[in-house]
Image (cartoon, helix red, strand yellow):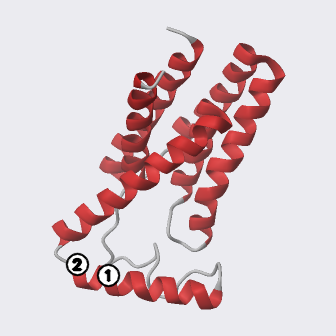
Amino acid sequence: MNSTQFMSALAVTAVVCAAITDLQKRRIPNWLTYPAMLLGLVLQGVLHGWGGLLTSAVGGFFFGGTFFLFYLIRAMGAGDVKLAVALGCLVGLGASFQVLFATALAGGVLAIIFMILSGRTLETLRNTLLVVAFHGQHGLQAHPTVNLDDTTAVRMPYGLACAVGTLYWAFSSQFWR
């Protein structure tokens, strides 16, 4: 097993644990995300020197920063953001783009599944249009009613999307090498 495969395996392990806790408790614990961030930074530094440490830190900043935008508008929880930072640190900047894209696709597919299973398709589509129009007009502000504070909303544990996206990336990247 080479270092890329090893870091991929660590990322998959962390994200699968996060998905399980997110599904069970609707939380991604700090005891999982902070050590994963540190492990990613340290191992990338040990394996690839200062360049590895830098690509790990920038990967965490990029991946986590992207999720942080959704946190700012109350569309995503802090645990999801910390998980994204950890994933970015574990896989580095180059792979962060790929994992983020795979995670976004998985999130879209899972959102459609959750929408259909909840029986709230029309309401979800209407709310999506309202949210897009709101943010087009008001920028990065939380929507007054369609946000994480709405206890009646159907919520999708995004740790699951992160796990599906990361698993897809880890397995597909091995086939393309």
Circle 1 sits on which residue? 125
- Could you tell me residue 107's position as x and y percent? 39, 56
- Could you tell me residue 171's position as x and y percent? 38, 28
| Nearer to me, 6 or 20 | 6
> 10 Å neighbourhood of mark 1: few (<14), some, or many (≥20)?
few
Q: Judging from the image, what secondary structure is the residue with disc 2 in?
A: helix
Circle 2 sits on which residue? 121
| Nearer to me, 120 or 149 | 120
Q: Residue furthest front?
A: 176
- Report whether 64 appears left or right of 100: right
**Identity of the amino acid at label 2?**
Thr
Residue plotted at (67% across, 20% down): 43
Q: Judging from the image, what secondary structure is the residue with disc 1 in?
A: helix
Q: Residue furthest top?
A: 1
Residue 116: which quarter of the image? bottom left
Residue contact at pointers 1 and 2, CB within 8 angstroms: yes
Residue plotted at (56% across, 19% down): 4
> How far apart, in angstroms, are the residues tagged by discs 1 and 2?
6 Å
